[in-house]
Structure formats: C-alpha cells, structure tokens
Image (cartoon, grey):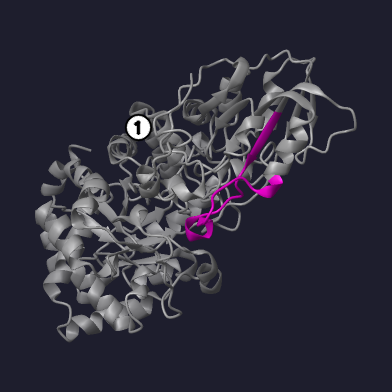
Amino acid sequence: MHNILTSVTTHESQIDALIQQMTLDEKIGQMTQVEKNSITPADVTRYAIGSVLSGGGGNPYANNPREWAKMVREYLEAGLQTRLSIPVIYGVDAVHGHNNVKGATIFPHNIGLGATGDAALIERIGEVVARELLATNVHWTFAPAVTVPQDIRWGRTYEGFSEQTDVVIPLALAFARGLDKAQQRVLHSYKHFAADGGTDWGTTRFDAWGTADNWQAATETYQIDQGDARIDEATLREIHLRPYKAAIEAGALNIMVSFSSWNGEKMHQHKYLLTDVLKGEWGFEGFLVSDWKAIDQISPDYRACVVRSINAGLDMVMVPYDYQRFIDTLRSAVDSGEVAIERIDDAVRRILRAKFALGLFEQRFGDETLLDAVGSPAHRAVAREAVRQSLVLLKNDGQTLPLSKKQPSLLLAGNAVDNIGIQCGGWTIEWQGDSGAITTGTSILDAIRQTVAPETTLHVDPLANFAEGLQADIGIAVIGEQPYAEGFGDRLRPALSEDDIAVLHRLRARCQRLVVVLVSGRPLILTEQLPMIDALVAAWLFGTEALGVTDVLFGDHPFTGRLPFSWARNSDHLPLAALKASAEAPLWRCGDGLS
C-alpha cells in the first residue's frame, strides 16, 4: 500500500489530458455507479458509466465463478467501446470472501477475524480474496469495514473487528495490504465514514421518499443502523475517525460514506467531514463513493440530494437504479451553476487517479486463469486456519475440552449443527444470507464425522428430541442466530432464542457434560443459561470451513482466540457506555479467552 500514492502522482499529466478531452456527460458518467440488473452493457457504453456493481445477491442467473467472470467481462468490455475508452471498475461486497459467488471461499466475518488478533493471517486472507475476485474480473471490494461498534444491538456488529479502535486499525490495514499483493491490485473501500458504529438506539428514521428498497420492513426493524451518532467531535475523532486517518496515511484510494448522521446531519451532505477533514486536513487524494441509494435520504427534493451531496465532496454515487435521472439532474445542476465544473473535475480526477493506480488502463480485465483457484483446497486451508484462531473458549469446567476423538457416542443438537447458511451469516450468496446448504462448504456435523474415530456413534437431532433413554457422556449443542444483515439484525435484546434455550435444556438432561458452540454475529446474553454449560465456545460467523472448529474442539490445535467485544451480563449493560458505567463487571471483558 505504501507505494500507491507514488504511482498516483506519476499519472497526473495523463489525467489532465483526459479531463481536457471529456465532455460534461462523460465526466458525469464517471461519477455514476449503477447496479448491474439495472443497466445493459450497451448503455454502459452509451452513458460512459464509470462503475457497475453487484449488491448483495447481485449474481448471474447461473451462480458460479465462470458465469461471474463472463458477466463482469461484458461490462468491462463496454467501457472499451466508449469514445475515450476509460475503464469501467466493477464493485462487489466481498466482505468475508467473494461471498456472493457460490463455491467461493467464505471466511469468518470481521468479528471473528478480530478475535484472532493476527494481522499477518488477515493479510493472507486479503490476498486470497483478491485472487478470487480477480478470477471473476472484479477489481473493487467494498471492504474492509473500519467501524468501531459501540452497541452490540446493532445488526452490523459482526462487520467490525472490535469495539476498540486500536484493534481495528492494524487488522483493517492488513486486509487492505493483502488485496494489494495479488497479481493485480484490488481497490479496497474503507467504510462507512463516519461513526456508523456509534449511533444511538432508536434514532433511525426513514422517510418514504428516500429509504431502503424494502421500506416497510425496514421501518419495523431498523432501530440503530443508519441512525444518529450523538457524540462530541473529540469522541468522534478518538473512536471513529482514527481508522480513516490511518488508512489515508497508508495510501487509501477509496472511502465509502455512511448512511448515518452525526448530531442530526446526514453524512452524505456533511461538507465539514467529507471535504474539510478528509480531503483538506488529512490530504485524502482518492475518491468518496456513496452507499446504496443513500443520497436519496437527504431531501424529498431529488435535485437537492444531488447538489448537496456532490458539493459536500461526494465523488461517485451508487445510484443504484435510475442512473438517467441522476445524470440528467447533475448535468442540469452544473448548467445552472448550482454545482461548479471545478467540483466535477475534482471528482473525476480522483476517480481516474484510482483507476490509473490500479493499472486498469493497462490491464482492463482480471485473470480468468485463476478460476480454478476459487474455493480451492489451498484457499480453504487459509480459511480453516482463520476459523480455528477465531474461536474463543469462554468456559471449560472440569477440562471438558479438548474432547477425545474416541468417544463411544456423542449427542449433537442445535439449529447450526448442520447448517452452512447459519454458520456463514449475512452477506453470503444473498444480502441477508439464508439457512441451509447455500454454498459449498463443511458443516460442523460434517467436520465432526471427519474427525472422530470410526467406532464413535453420532446421534443427531437439531431439536434434541432424542429417543427415550438415550444418554451420552458428551452432548454438543451448536446454536445461534439466524442470518441477517444491516438493520434487519437490530435487536433490542440480543440473547439466546427461546428455541435455543429449549434445546439446551433437553440436551442437558441427556448428557453428563454439555458443550455449547455459539454461532453468532455478536455476544449474546446467556447469563441464566451459563450454569448448565460445561464448556462454551464463541464461534462467531465462521464461514464455510467447520474443520477449523473441530481442530480445536478435539485438541489438534489450542484455543487462542480472544474476545474482540465485551460480553454483557444483561440488557441493562447495553450499549457499551452503560456497561462501562455499571458497578457490575461484564460477564467477560474484551480481550478475555481461555487457552
């Protein structure tokens, strides 16, 4: 990453020459990012579109790596057909692997990577992700999140490496370094600027004129995601801005702006933060991209949305649908003088600067010779290593763990015992994720079968409704949250579900020792259930490689993970500020974990 800015300065004369040749429409085209189902390659050429993206679930009809490569290539070829042949850059939310693609390697979400504390490992993960992206001709991932979640009720908690800024910074920079180490550079997008993890519960407000696509459902669930961070500037800078300053110093070329607000003002119109701080005070030379349809939330007047966001410093707009309206509106605003042509030229310069630094003018496409490496054993081995380093042992009475591989029998229960979708969580194949065998991978049941001795009998019932009289020394409950993403995961009381609690009680009655593997995107309140549990493992949302779980459950590797978040005893200790103010200690502190 350290040499990106050096390469940036070498292209300024070429950028000058391009900007001088460009028409206003071509400049606005560069500032426009469109969702792939909303535009044909022919219209990418016609409107000189700068970027196309796949949102969560934005997959080709036949979802496999080769069809992905073919789909993306068609949009990149459309850029070649424009008058000035400026390359299109294709973006995806590869937030824990190339996670929209069936068969790709799915890594633990950031909360699990935060538990590893291993920057060198995360750098290797970045390199693997880059190789799988490039195989499908994708050069841009909307990652890493450098959010610092201060309230585990937030549905995006798992996208944060930790509640502590000093943990977040080195791990996020390591992932970005890994993206830079592949055969071609992959653009990383630090997000979401700023304080998306510092919003207050109950401050999310949606207006029908400019919200999420599924507005009615969102109004019923979103409570803190896209809310308002009601904090002073000193707190904003100390907790939430420092990762962006570090990223800029390391050569960041892209930052994504947050849906959220700071003290009532939407980030997408916040000129002080976007222009004065990022670009002025800190000298950011890359470009700012909006989040999905986010400028629409600024005002019921769409023209005001466009004018305010661009004048605040936004450079590229993730429209994502009606790109003709955006283009026409911005052109009209420039013609009327509401947006200065100098602001347009600055935005285009920043976008072109990133495209030159990535080498897109020399190498328009990715590397389809890497297709056979997508989901390969070598890539999955890195993910397996990440899984075993991410697991945190929180309780181990009577040295219950590690388990012997030669148990006569094991009782296995829980909604996540044989469910790849649950163990991967949201942002997997679909935006919200899904339950079941949604992609290629190994479930915990599969992993246990591959690990225990041939003579071990496995009794499996997700609901723990075992035959009358059946008993075993060890019962393993793999329980956890159903997949969710963004505000659809906002929860007033993030706790074990009633169904999970019932499974624990039924299984406890059948075994001498109860092992619980908790699959979740955040700490869950389980204080009342803790006495019945002999061994408790926080497994987070660990992805497709469950052999990493059995590696530590059965003692082939030690537990090394440490909590990236504090673990509250009850909901009165939420958010983190309430926990810190309480005279009662947390159940476990950030950094805790047994070996």
Please name whichever residue, 285 or 367, is drawn nearer the observer in this view of the structure: 285
Q: Is 464 on the left-hand or right-hand side of 118?
A: right
User: SS of the residue at dot 1?
Assistant: helix
Please say if 426 is above or below 230. Answer: above
**Residue at the (54%, 51%) spot, across then down:** 67
Residue tagged 1: 123
Q: Which residue lies most toward the front here? A: 583
Magenta-highlighted residues: 476-499
Q: Give the amino acid at mark 1.
A: Glu
Please name whichever residue, 232 or 357, is drawn nearer the observer in this view of the structure: 232
Please name whichever residue, 147 or 578, is drawn nearer the observer in this view of the structure: 578
**Residue at the (25%, 70%) spot, across then down:** 269
Does the rendering let one see residue 436?
yes
Q: Position of residue 249 (x, y in %)?
A: 17, 42
Does the rendering let one see residue 22?
no
Is residue 12 rendered magenta in the image? Answer: no
Please say if 133 is above or below 155. Answer: above
